[in-house]
Image (tube, rainbow, N blue to C red):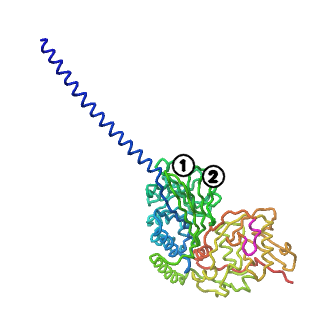
Amino acid sequence: MLKCINGCKFQFFLLLILTTSMVIGCSNESIDNALSNGEEQEKEEKKHVEEETTITILHDTHFHGSFGDDEVNLAKYVDFINSIRYEKENVLFVGAGDEISPSLMAGLWNGEHMIEALNASGLDVTTFGNHEFDYGPENLEALVSKSEFQWVSANIIDKQTGDVFAKDQGARRYIIKDIDGVNLGITGLAPKDMGDFTSLGETVEEIDFIEAMKAVVPEMKDAGADIILVLSHLANYDAEELADEVNGIDIIVGDHNSKVNDEPKYINDTIVSFAGDEYDYLGEINIQVTGGKIADWSYTLHTVEEHVGYNQNVQTIIDRYNKELEEQLEVEIGKRTVEFDTRLESIRYKETAVGNFIADTIRDWANADVAIQNGGGLRGNQVWGANESITRKEIQEILPFRSFASKLEVTGELLLEVLDYSVSNEGEGAFLQVSGIEMKYDPSKDAGERIVEIKINGEPLDVNKTYTLATNNFLHTGGDGYSMLLKSKPIIVEEAGPLLSNLIIKAIEEVGVVSTEIEGRIVKVDQ
C-alpha cells in the first residue's frame, strides 16, 4: 500500500511539472502576442498622428436654377473644377443650396433641369436652401430621389418622422466620408425663418440652426468624424454667429446673401468662407490634416471667367434645355383686354395698365399694404395691343432682369419720401408704378412737398403708421437712387422671394385674362 502511495505521488508530481511547463509556455506566447499587437497598435496610432493628408474643398453652388450665360456657365464651372481634380488628389465639390430655382427654366421644369446637369457635374454633396421649396416639398422629394449626389440637412425636418426631410428619397442629417483616412463629417443648414418666404407645406419644419448644430456635432463626433464641414445657406451674419456659438465646427462654406470674401474669416477655430453665388467665383480651401485635426490651411478665390474650356457633357444638357426653352417661350399663357404699354414716354412718366398689373401682383404675393415697381425695370419700349394673347417671351421682354420680389416694413414718413422722390424723376427709370396708392403730385414744388394728396387703400397716409411694402430687390438695396429704402425693415429680401418674371407668368396663367386698367393711381396736377 505504501509503495502504491509513493508511486501515485511520483506520478502526480510528474504530471504537475509537465502541466506547469505547458502553462508557462502558453503564457509566454500569449504575452508575446499581446506585446506584438500593442506595438502594432501603437505604430498605427503614431502613423495616424504623424501622417499628413491634404483635402481640397471646392465651394459652392447657389446657382438659382440658372445655367448661366454663353460666356460663364455651369459647363465652364465644371470644367474648371475638373481641371483642379486633375491636378490634385482628395478633391471634394460641395454645394450650399438654392440649386434648382428661381429662373425662367425653373418655372418651366420645377428644377429638374438643374438636377440633370448637376448629376453630370460631379457634385458630391449639397444642402437645402429656401428656393429648393419654391415648388413645394413633394416636388423636392422627387428631385432628391433623382439626384446622384448627396443631400444633407441638420435643420429641415419631417414633422411626421422627426428625421431629416426626404430621408426615404436619400437625404441625410449628415454623412461621414472617408477621404484618404480622414473621416470628414458633412452636414447642411437652410436659412433662418425661411418658412416665412417659401413653401414648406404642412409636414416640413425648420428648426433653430444653433440648436440643430448643438445636437448634430456631438453625434458626428461619436460616429467617428475627424473634421466637421457645414454646407451653409444661412445669411453670412448667422453663419458667423454659428461659428462663435457652437464648438467643434471646422469649416463653414456658403451664404444665403451671396457675400464674397477674398479670404475666409477664422472664428472660434472655424474657417468661415463666402464665395458669392452662381458662376462668378469658385472658392478653394486646402486643409492639411494631421492626427485627425487641421494643422494648416490655405484659400484661393478663383474667378471662373478666366478659365478656358467647357465640359462637353454639361454643355450638351444646357444646349438641349435652351432649345426647348425657345419653344416654350412662344407658348400662350393667357390673354389681355388692355394694352401693355412699356414705351419710355409712358412707363417713366405716368400710370400704365401693365405697371398696375405688375405692382398688384407683387403686392398680392407679399400680402402687403402697398407695392412699387420702378419704370426702369420694365422694358420692351413698345405697345402690345389689347385683346391679344400673352406669351412667356413677351413677359421675358418686359421683365428681362433677374429681379426678385421683396417685402419690407416702412413708416408712412419713409413711404412719402419714396413717392416724393419718384415723381421728381419723370422720364427716368426711378419713376414708380404703384399698387394700393392713389396720389396727386405737383413736380414744380420743392422736395418733400411734391405729393399734394395721397391715400393708402382709400385712407389718408399716416406718417406715423407702419406699412408693409412690396417691391423688388433692386429697389430695396438702394437702386435707382432709393437709398432711403436702406432704412426700412427687411422682411423678405436678399433674393429670398420669387423671380419677378416667374411671378408674373404664374399670375397670368392663374387669372387667364388680364384686364387691369388705368385707375387714377398717379395723377399729375394741372399746371
The quarter holding residue 73 reads bottom right
Amino acid type assigned to the residue bearing label 2 in the image: Asp
Q: Nearer the viewer, residue 210 or 236?
A: 236
Earlier sequence position, callout 2 versus callout 1:
1
Mark 2 burial class by Cα count in 10 Å: few <14, some 14-19, many 20+: some
Q: Which residue is mark 2?
A: 244
* Residue 146 picture location, percent across and down: 44, 67
* Residue 6 picture location, percent across and down: 16, 15
* Residue 437 picture location, percent across and down: 75, 72
Bounds of the magenta segment: 478-486
Locate the C terminus by quadrant. Answer: bottom right
For residue 43, side relative to residue 469 (left or right): left
Q: Which residue is mark 1?
A: 215
Q: Are marks 2 and 1 in contact (CB under 8 Å)?
A: no
Q: What secondary structure predominates along the stretch shown in magenta?
A: helix
Q: Nearer the viewer, residue 447 or 302?
A: 302
> Is residue 133 something one can see in this rendering?
no
Camera-side mark, 2 or 1: 2
Amino acid type assigned to the residue bearing label 1 in the image: Ala
Q: Is residue 85 above or below residue 172?
A: below
